[in-house]
Image (tube, rainbow, N blue to C red):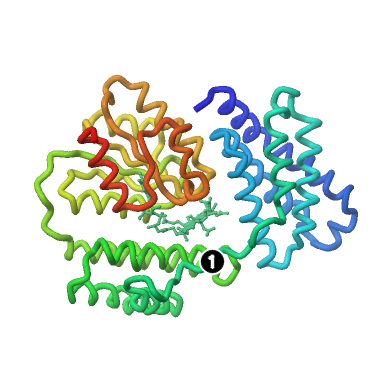
Amino acid sequence: MDESAKQLSRLIENFAAALAEYAVTRHAEIDPDLPERYGRGWRSSWVGDVKARLSYLAQAIAVRQPSLFLDNLRWTRTAFAAREVATEDLRNSLVALREVLEAELPESASRVALPYVVEALDHLEQASSRPPTHLDGSAPRAELLLRYLEAVLEGRREDAVRTVLEAAEKGASVRELYEQVLQPAQAEIGRMWHLGEISIADEHFATATAAMTMSRLRAHFPEPPPSNRRMIAAAVGGDLHEIGVRMVADFFEMEGWSVYCIGANVPVEDLVQTVRERRAHLLALSAGTSLHLRTVGEAIGAVRADPACDGVRILVGGAAFAAVPDAWKELGADGYAGSASQAVALAERLLSGR
Ligand code: B12
């Protein structure tokens, strides 16, 4: 990662609370009706929102991808629209933020940061704001996916789990059930949450059901081929998404690898220590949102800096990379894969030097 981009990214994050306060004050000057329209708590909710936006800006700067900030703005616009918040309010908030960054950041910093905000402002209203569904009637196992999702959304956990287990008993492979049922079901849950169609509680219920289904599918893992490869799978510190990283780990396990999956939210020091102690051939690092991209880069830097970790290959993945699949290069990884099955294929290729 570029050192000056990393420093600016940290600077913005460290001052996000103060910058957000200034930006909200300025927003209310631009639009004096704002407090009245949003009522009690208007200030704290806008400050929270702008603070989050600054964190996304900081991440976009860390990986030097303005499109990432624009992607977050579009994401916010969609979430706002679903909750009847006018895009005009988002635009004014962004205009206020631009002015505050210009006034408060040192000149050398605002020269880098401002184009990100200006580009986002220029393109905010372009492109459809409604994310497409992940349910594709012509996809393999579409009907099973629907039955599983319906049971989850109706709160029938055991029915949901059984639906998938029965398919496994009838011969469906665990790999297919992971990638054709559980993953799109979770993605659809995320889309529905984004659009305000389901609550956080519904998402938590769905995620726990997916985790439970995965655990029960272990009984259906195929006999693995022999392998002497070792891998570690983890999601970086601060990232709470754990299903993806577990899924990746399980795919490697099914290929016979010796797998040490340490799940979500792993601090950098523990990651380095684990790679060192386990003499892993591969480290699979996951990030569920773009809020954790810089940490991915820092974790990779720390592993690379430890001579005892020499030779370990590092793959990155997770929903954070959906909008910036090339960011792995800036972060210093050896590669990126968009799915667990692609991760296995890429790892085999990297380790056999092909
Ligand atoms: C469940 C969930 C949560 C749960 C996670 C709980 C848990 N125990 O895991 C909770 C509630 C904590 C959560 C919180 C947040 N979430 Co969330 N979450 C999800 C959701 C709905 C499902 C995640 C999941 O289980 N996916 C299923 C797995 C199998 O898919 P996957 O992770 O993509 O993994 C596959 C591939 O990506 C790949 N892969 C994954 N890791 C790796 C690693 C390597 C090395 C490789 C090669 C491949 C690879 O292989 C996997 C299998 O094929 C997603 C929606 C989605 N599209 O995924 C949103 C989603 C990821 N979350 C999102 C957001 C915004 C957030 C929050 C910021 C919300 C907020 N404002 O608070 C917070 C961040 C919290 C934090 N600090 O991490 C956004 C991210 C947008 C973005 N691009 O940044 C998403 C996409 C929702 C959406 N549609 O907007 N979330």
Residue appearing at x 33%, y 30% in the figure: 272
Residue appearing at x 43%, y 68% in the figure: 205
116 left or right of 243 in image: right
Q: Which residue is mark 1?
A: 132
Residue type, numbered disc 1? Pro
Is residue 135 visible in this depiction of the protein?
yes
Residue located farthest toward the front when viewing the structure as drawn: 354
Q: Position of residue 354 (x, y in %)?
A: 24, 36
Q: Position of residue 258 (x, y in %)?
A: 18, 43
Residue located farthest toward the top when viewing the structure as drawn: 307
The one nearer the camera, 153 or 313, is 313
Residue appearing at x 78%, y 32% in the figure: 102
Question: Which quarter of the picture shows residue 313?
Answer: top left
Is residue 280 visible in this depiction of the protein?
no
Q: Is mark 1 within 8 Å of ligand 1?
A: no
Q: Position of residue 235 (x, y in %)?
A: 39, 44
80 left or right of 288 in image: right
124 left or right of 63 in image: right
Q: Classify mark 1: residues with Cα within 10 Å, few (<14), some (14-19) or many (20+).
A: few
Classify mark 1: helix, strand or loop: loop
Q: Position of residue 33 (x, y in %)?
A: 89, 58
Residue appearing at x 90%, y 54% in the figure: 32
The one nearer the camera, 308 or 315, is 315
Q: In the rendered image of this protein, does residue 30 appear above or below residue 57? A: below
Q: In the rendered image of this protein, does residue 257 appear above or below residue 171? A: above
